[in-house]
Structure formats: C-alpha cells, structure tokens
Image (spheres, helix red, strand yellow):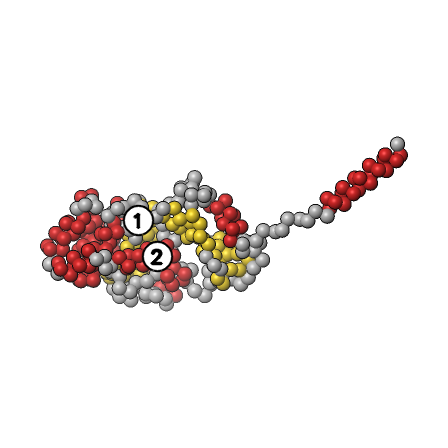
Amino acid sequence: MRFLTVAAALCLSAGAALFSQTPAPAPKSALDKPTLEAYIRHLLLWNPQIQVAISDPKPAPMPGYQEFTVTGSYGQASLDEVFYVSADGSRIVRGAVYDINASPFQTELSRLTTDLHPSMGTPGAPVVIVLFSDYQCGYCRQEAQQLRANLLKTFPTQVRLYFKDLPIDAIHPWARNASIAGRCVFRQDALKFWDYHDWIFDKQAEVTPDNLKPKITEWATANSLDLVQFARCYDQRETEAEINASIAEARSLRVDSTPTLFVNGRKVPGTVSFAQLKAIIEFEIGHAQTTGQGGEKCCEVTLPTPLGK
C-alpha cells in the first residue's frame, strides 16, 4: 500500500513538472498584419464579405508608435480607419492625436485642397468652408439651397466657400456624370458654374441617367456655352480625374456621407440648419479675432455590419 502511494505521488509530481514545462503561448503582436486584421474585424464587426487592406506602417505623430491605415471595402463603398500600434505590438490606439501648438484641425487642413475648385465669397476670408456634395442627393439639394440663399447675405466678406464633388456611385447612377458636366462648365466659365449648380439641384427630381445629357445640353445652349468645347469635355470625360481626386481626398478625410462641410477644418457632416452653421461661423470669426489667426490656410456610404456603421 505504501509502495502504491509513493508511486502515485511520483506520477503526480512528474505530471506537474511536465505541465509546468509547457511553454506559454507567444504574445500576439499588432505589428503582424493578419493579427491586426483579425482584431479590427472583431472590433468593427467587419465580417468576411468586407475586404480589408492594411497599409505599411509609417511613423505616428507620437513617439513609440507606428501608424497604420486600415481600409474596409464592400462593392463600391470603402472606409479608412487609422490605428496607432506600440513599438512592441502590444497596444493599439484608435483616435485623434493633437499638437497643442497647432490647430486641432491641422490634419484636416493639410489634406483639404482648394486650388482650381468652384468657389464663392471673399478670398482670404477668416472662415473657409469646403463642401463635399452629390448632385443626386436630396439632402445635398437642401444644403445647397440654404447656403446659396443665406451664406453671403449673412457673411458678405467673412466667408469663402469651395465646392467639391463626391458622387456616391453605389446609390446615385447619374451623379458622377452630373459632376463631370459641372466641372466642364467650370473650366469654360467659372461664374456660370454656380448657375449650373443651382439648375441641376433644382431639376434633381426630373433627371434620369437617360435624359441627363440632353437636359445638360439644353441648359448649356440656353446659357451660351461653347457647345463644341462642352460636348468634347463631357463626352471624353475630361474632368473625371478631378472628380476622382475629390473622392480620394474625401476618403482621406473619412468623409462617408453627403453633404459634409469642413469649416476651417472642422468636420460638420450631414445637413445642418443655417442657424447652426451661422453659430459655428461666428465662433470661428471670434476665435480668429481673439488669436490673430484666420485666412485660408441623406446620402451615406456604409459597410454591411450588423450596426450599419
């Protein structure tokens, strides 16, 4: 009996020693792209039908971290998310990083371009608004109408507005061609762009993919455009590269709905009342006066997650 007890104790001891020598699993590292992808899919509810691409790392704005851009795509819809990964791969940070010595919207300002885009208002104004819009979007139509009716009447010298195209091809079949036409008008006569802008939004309910071209041609004739030049520009899609550049810029700014405004870099998505926009503009004017700074420096794209975001 004593022999059996000793033998059992030895077996237990050997088993414990064997168990204690089993190596611990290697720690996961977010620097490994498949590991990072799996983690983000779980975090954002991105199921297998969403394609994921992860950029190569680049230095993050804070020491000890690397920055990754993670792009989720489904059909024609895509969204970019930025993550910061610690040097040892053990920590992931999602969010904005601010430099106290710069504007809190410096990242947005550095990505927004305004050269050679339709604009109205005073050059060098203390408040610069950049609008991303879609001619087939009903909410964009409402936003356009209130901006055209109120913006310069309320702020005749303090604001400059730039218009940028963001046609959402997945749900708006004629918006891209309407944008191409608008840029063709702008190329030929910058002042007539705003007449086209107002007209196409006004006729939004009447336009179809089939009748868009004849309607635009009729408008161009009535507004004394050079029809040969306009037809060549439109038919050869000469301005489509400009539309694609605006779309790429919107993606870099994480714009996923129209209309979206940037007021001195501050992102204002969706339709806002003019009273709300007026308050934001007045705040920016006051801030510029206080700090001595200023001057230029509906429709939604979603991925198919259970939350719809």
Is any part of residue 83 visible from this angle? yes
Decide: few, some or many residues near mark 1? Use Cα within 10 Å; few <14, some 14-19, many ≥20.
many
Q: In the shown orientation, is residue 90 left or right of residue 107?
A: right
User: To which residue does mark 1 refer?
Assistant: 168
- Pick the front one: 254 or 36: 36
**Mark sitting earlier along the chain (1/2):** 1
Amino acid tagged 1: Ile
| Of the pair 47 and 253, the residue shown nearer to us | 47
Q: Secondary structure at mark 2?
A: helix
Query: Mark 2 = which residue?
Result: 248
| Left or right side of 6 for 262 | left
Image vertical order of residue 44 relative to residue 220, above or below:
above
Q: Which of the image's four quarters has the C terminus?
A: top left
For the residues bearing labels 1 and 2, Cβ distance under 8 angstroms: no
Q: Quadrant of residue 282?
A: bottom left
Q: Within 10 Å of the Cα at label 2, are there few (<14), some (14-19), or many (20+) other Cα atoms?
A: some
Q: Secondary structure at mark 1?
A: loop
- Where on the picture, by quarter, is residue 17? top right
Where residue 156 appears, as percent x and y from the top left, is: 23, 60
Task: Tell me which residue sits at (39%, 53%) in the image.
Answer: 254
| Whole-percent x, y for residue 32 in the image | 54, 54
- The quarter of the picture where the N terminus appears is top right
* Residue 80 numbered mark, or none: none
Q: Is residue 287 visible?
A: no
Q: Tell me where residue 292 sits by quadrant.
A: bottom left
User: What kind of residue is marked 2?
Assistant: Ala
